[in-house]
Structures are given as C-alpha cells and as structure tokens.
Image (spheres, rainbow, N blue to C red):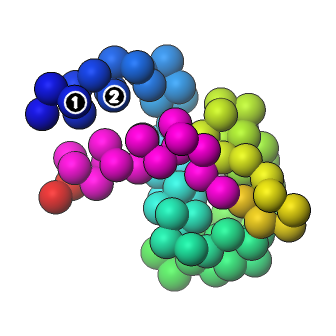
Amino acid sequence: MAELAESIRRLRERVVKVDVIDILILRCIGSARRRYIEIDACVYEHGVNLRNALANRLLKLRERGLVARDGDAYVLTDDGRELLRIVRALTA
C-alpha cells in the first residue's frame, strides 16, 4: 500500500487534470486497443460517444505524458501505466 501511495504522490500533478473519460481511454489503450479507431470503438462500447473529441483527448493525454504515439498507434507511457495500475487497485 505504501508503494501505491508513493505512486499517487508522484503522479498527483498530472492526475488532477484527468477525468473519468480520460481513465476510460487509458483503459482501452491498456487493453491492447491502440489505434484511433479501436480506441473510439472501445470508448463507444462503454456507452461514451466522443465523436470528434477523442483526438483532442488523446492530444491532452500526450501533453500530460500519459500516452505517446508509436507510428499509427497510441501506447501508455510509464506514467500512464502507473496511473492505470493505481486506478485498477482502487477499483478492485
């Protein structure tokens, strides 16, 4: 639990600007849906229709250092994986 608390402290500044939709996008990327169309479909499967807002959300996640581009795919950065680990621990 101390490790989880330390991760939260380290990511606090980036986490403050992340909302539920951003977490959903991170979960989709973390579940091997890495292309834009796959992420869009994954988010839609959870009842969220972002339409044109997904590109903006992905850009903001990249600016915060939680997501990076790898060719035509999106991948979680170390901080993105850590944030997703924290979310999974809190929702388990």
Picture mark count: 2
Amino acid at circle 2: Ser
- Which residue is under mark 2? 7
The outermost residue toward the right is 71
Amino acid at circle 1: Glu
Residue displayed at 34% across by 49% down: 85
Is the residue 62 above or below the residue 5 in the image?
below
Residue 82 lies within the magenta run: yes
Find out whether the residues at labels 2 and 1 contact each other: C-beta distance under 8 Å.
yes
- Residue 52 position in % (x across, y down): 80, 61
Residue displayed at 72% across by 40% down: 62
Left or right: where 41 falls relative to 31: right
Circle 1 residues within 10 Å: few <14, some 14–19, many ≥20: few
5 and 39: which is toward the camera: 5
Dominant SS type (magenta): helix
Please tell me whether mark 2 sits on a helix, a strand or a loop.
Answer: helix
Quadrant assignment, res 32 = bottom right
In magenta, the rendered stretch is 75-90
Is the residue 13 above or below the residue 56 in the image?
above
- The N terminus, quarter of image: top left
Left or right: where 62 falls relative to 76: right
Residue displayed at 66% across by 41% down: 61
Residue displayed at 40% across by 20% down: 10
- Residue 70 position in % (x across, y down): 80, 58
Is the residue 36 above or below the residue 21 in the image?
below
- Residue 31 position in % (x across, y down): 49, 72
Q: CA distance from mark 2 to mark 1?
A: 6 Å
- The C terminus, quarter of image: bottom left
Quadrant assignment, res 11 = top left
Q: Is residue 20 visible?
A: no
- Which residue is under mark 1? 3
